[in-house]
Image: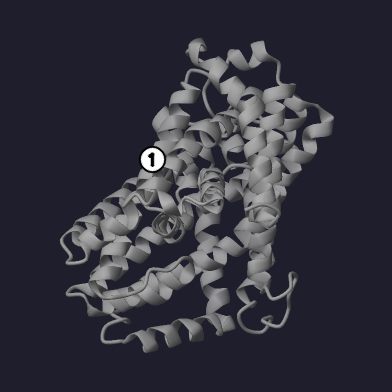
Amino acid sequence: MPPRDHWSSRLGFVLAAAGSAIGLGNVWKFPYITGVYGGGAFVLVYLAAVALVGIPILVAEILIGRRARKDPVGAMRAVGGRAWAGVGWLGVGASFVILSYYSVVAGWTLAYAARAASGGFTGLDAAAISTLFDAFLADPTRQLFWHACFMALVIAIVVGGVAKGLERWNKVLMPALVAILLVLFVVALRSPGAAAGFRFMFHADFHKLTPKAWLEALGHSFFTLSLGMGAMLTYGSYLSTKTDLLRSAVVIAVFDALMALVAGLVIFPICFTFGLQPAAGPGLIFKTLPVAFAQMHGGSLFALLFFLLLAFAALTSAISLLEVAVAYFVDERGWPRPRATLGMGGVIFLLGIPSALSFSRLAHVHLYPGMTLFDSLDTLATNYLLPIGGLGIALVAGWRLARPVALEEFRDPRLFPYWHLAIRYLAPVAVVLILLFKMGVVG
């Protein structure tokens, strides 16, 4: 077997891991739930949840990967025992499921970036832009084309390996993403709706901190860091033992939270400037904001930058998902990386076809009552696969991994007892609450 790939630097790992965490949800979900659930009050709860639950599980996932130097299945078997290999299988399965439909949405960002580049939103009103998006969803040819384009980009990056593929491209995409976000932030800051946008996100209304708000903050602190899907474990398996694991995890979490907050400070001032109603989900991105761009001076340029921002964020997340599947076939089956990448990328593209057609020819097909195939797969992954995977990570790190072995992975032993307490008791309880919340049992 050839030597295992590795990151060439700590910076490369941090950028890649942050890229995995920073995705479309940072833009279309976090800012909205912040405004709905109490603004600054919700941010405080969310940051506490990241510190007490998100970071401990993130550390655990990277630690298991680095300790075992294997893919999720092999790592969980090596660290937890044969009985826990199923948790690794959940991660690999989740990567297939999530990327199959995530690639479809990411394809939309490429399509809208291309439209923005040609000035395709100029002069359109809200009704025309809504009709444009609905027609785009209903066109199976365009859905499949952009799904294929995005998966081709993902495959082209992952086939290059860790240092020459994942690391090299994250060192390009992540700085570009930050630069674009900062340009848009300056534009939003100068808009008439800036004050209203800041109030929407940061006015601390503690009366809105209902039990559901607390659970929403807890759940988002888990999902925003790409936990439970094997991505951080796989990335950790390429990490040098000389790298400070805890410090890297904190940097990743802080970077992710900052990007989500700044994204909100871009979106909401623009919405309030043009009298648009903020909403969560694809409607905000593909129906609401293009209305604002159509009315802005220089709107075509800003629309292009915005959709490029989304495409870059989607791409850095997607390559980490494909890498999970590729790592399994390279480590467990002995496949060469090109074969594993092209093969699994092709399989995921095929799995994504039903999601791409779920708004047109397969709109009548429902796995869950009242849900399209696209929404059904999203529900399966976020409500079940990821929480169960995250719970397994916490239990293996806290209860199966010997304390002295785990301690060896910490550069500063004084911080270890706090992490060990969190991963043994706090994190499992929190993930069970997230699972029950997503199932509708609590909250």
- Please say whether residue 301 is visible from this viewpoint: yes
Q: Is residue 31 above or below residue 231?
A: below
In the displayed orientation, state which residue is furthest to the right.
83
Mark 1 closeness class: few <14, some 14–19, many ≥20 residues within 10 Å: some
In the displayed orientation, state which residue is furthest to the front.
207
Q: Quadrant of the N terminus?
A: top right
Q: Which residue is mark 1?
A: 255
- Please identify the quarter of the rendering in which residue 351 is found: bottom right
Residue lying at 46% horizontally and 34% vertically, measured from the top left? 13
Q: Toward the viewer: 344 or 92?
A: 92
Is 188 left or right of 31, judged from the image as shown? left
Is 39 left or right of 191, judged from the image as shown? right
For badge 1, the amino acid type reads Phe
Residue 340 place in picture, x, y as percent: 67, 48
Q: Secondary structure at mark 1?
A: helix
Residue lying at 56% horizontally and 48% vertically, measured from the top left? 215
Residue lying at 59% horizontally and 45% vertically, measured from the top left? 323
Is 242 left or right of 259, judged from the image as shown? right
Q: Is residue 342 above or below residue 50?
A: below
Q: Toward the viewer: 430 or 164?
A: 430
Residue lying at 59% horizontally and 13% vertically, measured from the top left? 407
Residue 124 place in picture, x, y as percent: 31, 87
